[in-house]
Image (cartoon, rainbow, N blue to C red):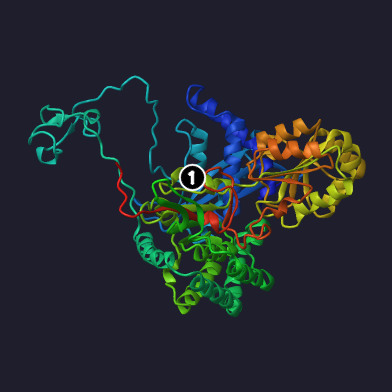
Amino acid sequence: MRFEIMRAHIRDLQRVKPLWKAMLLRYVDVIGPDLPVRDPNAAWALRHEEYLTWLNDGAGVVYLAVDTENNDKVVGYAALHFTSSGSAFDMGQWCGELESLAVAEAARGCGIGTRLIEACRSELKRREITYWSLETLAGNAEAKRLYERAGFEPFMLRMIRRVDSPQAQIRADDPMTAPLVIPAGMLGQSGTAGELPGGGAGVATVDEVPLPVPTPTVVPTVQAAGDAARVAARRLAVATSAQKNRALQAMADAVAAQSPRILDANSRDLERARVKGLPDSLVDRIRLDQGRLDGIADALRDLVALPDPVGHVVRGSTLPNGLQIRQVRVPFGVIGMIYEARPNVTVDAAGIAMKSGNAVILRGGSAASYSNRALVATLREAIERAGLPADAVHLLEGGHDEAVSLMRARGLVDVIVPRGGAKLIETVVTQSTVPVIETGSGNVHVYVDAAAELGKALEIVVNAKTQRPSVCNAAETLLVHADIAARFLPLVLPALHEQSVKIHGDVATITAAAGVGVPVLEAGELDWACEYHGLEIAVRVVADLDEAMAHVARYSTGHTEAIVTEDRTAARRWTSEVDAAVVMVNSSTRFTDGGEFGFGAEIGISTQKLHARGPMGLPEMTSTKWIVEGDGHIRS
């Protein structure tokens, strides 16, 4: 067999699915059916999402072994993840984890596994990472031999048991499992010295003594940023609209004046991205040019012209007893922003925070670190020149520990807003102790109804997919009513193909594509759920409006869903029955944007239902307080 090792792109990930499933089945062979191995399809869905996140964030690489004599069929792959080394062992700031290594059974014995390991080792060496590790099943002797030949040594031992399995025998002389002896001086306040809280003598098992719950610690950099931001937030809360507008204008002017410095920093991010082989979609999100930088400055100027939400009276009244009550908008205080490599978000967040009277702590993706550093330095200088505290904007530049610390800085940070892919958002939502406004990923659908005007539909679909495919409001799935599929698919498939869009389709789509010479890959379950972030789309023919809405209900992330139709009844059903932050009729999904909605720069698009939903502009970055004024009123 002749094979080559190549670096995988996001679009290649589906090609490793059969190997992943075979690996899961191998787990069952090794450990038996009673231990917790997931269903292969469910396991692949989770692993595929992890691979997508790593590749998008530059936090990992996937290498493929392809059979060059068999149409580059994938016969093996390795997935390497870059992660912080933790606190116990000094392995440097970063270490590598070989998360997956699989070789097709028919290709074993050809040296593919060794070559894949070597490709990963070379990548780590190029990144100046010193250590890497892996996990393998204790009973998989074949895998252990392979890894030992590659130089890996046993290090840690992971052991497993079910919580409800029969209690193992505990030896009293075993220091690791014997009853816990508690000196009298270490007892709690209940009871006397030498007595347990429950009244017993000085020996107790672990079950009898409540173990302390660790309190999350805030690393010094986050503590310092939080303390300074809270001081700044108190100044901003009472700043006048004129003061905040002067700062915004100064920020915009500074971005324009410092554009050479900012673009030079951005070029360093782009060069690093190219060296790392980051996906084109991520590189596009990192890239700044003069046009994009002018747009960022203009968005700040647009904020100057928008109404100040602080102090706006939401509602109020005078009660029968003469008490005057009113609900007014007030700043949150300190906002924490955790986001991926999007330099424009750095400025958008700072601008919206300023206008809404909030301080902001930014933690952006490392792939845009040079750009973010230059932008934040520019903004802080401008804010200070305008007479407001520079600490209104902070940038965290540390590793994973800082991000986790920011998520758990309750009392320092009032709200966290994550912005990025599904995995980032899920991580923030599940790990944060600070309240989170959830901005969702965008598995966005366009449904072309039987009553659609086909020329209009064609323009909408092509724009929704290709105008900027890497962003969350780009279309990812096209649904076509069966009654017009024979007329519309021969129009839209070549149009998408001409724009270099890779198409995944159902059987009906594949059949139609063959008639016009457009290549289409067979779509699977993961395609319907995938946010491609690039020039790829899934296409399905549906029987009617109800089937289209059922598909959306199953796979939508609740971001934006569009219908193209001239049937007002169908349009009304779509807008009332589809559950999403934005529902559209006869419009490209690319209009789901705070700027396009007239909000100025947006801080994100919320897909949750509490506090804010949809594009979040200035009002969404405030809370409210009740003000009650009386004249010696007392309650009887």
Towards the viewer: 180 or 327: 327
Q: Residue most toward the left?
A: 193
Q: Is residue 373 above or below residue 110?
A: below
Q: Is residue 224 visible?
A: yes
Q: Residue 276 location in percent, x, y?
A: 60, 60
Residue 447 percent coordinates (x, y) = 77, 41
Does residue 505 appear in this view? no
Q: Quadrant of the N terminus?
A: top right
| Residue sitting at x 59%, y 43% | 49
Q: Give left or right: position of 626 versus 284.
A: left
Q: Which residue is mark 1?
A: 429
Q: Residues within 10 Å of mark 1 (few under 14, many from 20)?
A: many
| Dot 1: element | helix
Q: Is residue 580 left or right of residue 354?
A: right
**How many marks do you count on the picture?**
1
Q: What's the amino acid at mark 1?
A: Val
Closer to the camera in the image, 581 or 220: 581
Q: Quadrant of the C terminus?
A: top left
